[in-house]
Amino acid sequence: MQYVTASEIERIKLRANFINGLAIGVVLIGVFTPITRAAYDPAMKGDVFLFMALSAGVCLVLGLSYATRHLSEML
């Protein structure tokens, strides 16, 4: 049986918090920024909107997969 010290537990928690913050940042910048720009910019053309929707989808998948993969490795 392997024992984990309190300092190792705290390191794991801090690392998980940092990775969670990175994932949240990717989702916020990549998903919500284009949505708000599309909502407040009436002059946006359709081809730009398609690119923004695709990049938002990619950022959402990257943020969720990054957090899920790294946080599951810590457990």
Image (spheres, rainbow, N blue to C red):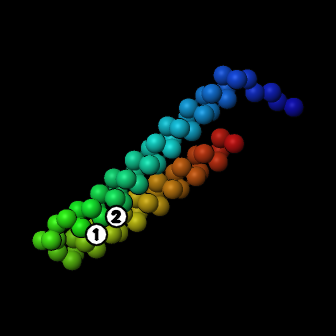
Residue 64 image position (x, y, % from top left): 51, 56
The amino acid type of the residue labelled 1 equals Phe
Secondary structure at numbered mark 1: helix
Q: Mark 1 — residue?
A: 51
* Residue closer to the observer: 36 or 46: 36
> Which residue corresponds to mark 2?
55
User: Contact, CB < 8 Å: mark 1 with mark 2?
Assistant: yes
Residue drawn at (56%, 32%) of the image: 14
Provide the secondary structure element on which disc 2 rests. Answer: helix
Query: How far across and down, in percent of the image, does residue 9 sit?
Result: 67, 29
Marker disc for residue 29: none
Asked which quadrant contains residue 44, the reply is bottom left
The extreme bottom residue here reads: 46
In the rendering, at what x and y percent does residue 17 appear?
A: 53, 38
Question: Residue 1's x, y, as percent?
Answer: 87, 31
| Relative side of 4 to 51, left or right | right
Q: Residue furthest right?
A: 1
**Mark 2: few, some, or many residues within 10 Å (few <14, many ≥20)?**
some
What amino acid is labelled 2 in the image? Ser
Left or right position of 32 against 24: left
The residue lying at 34 percent from left, 59 percent from top is: 32
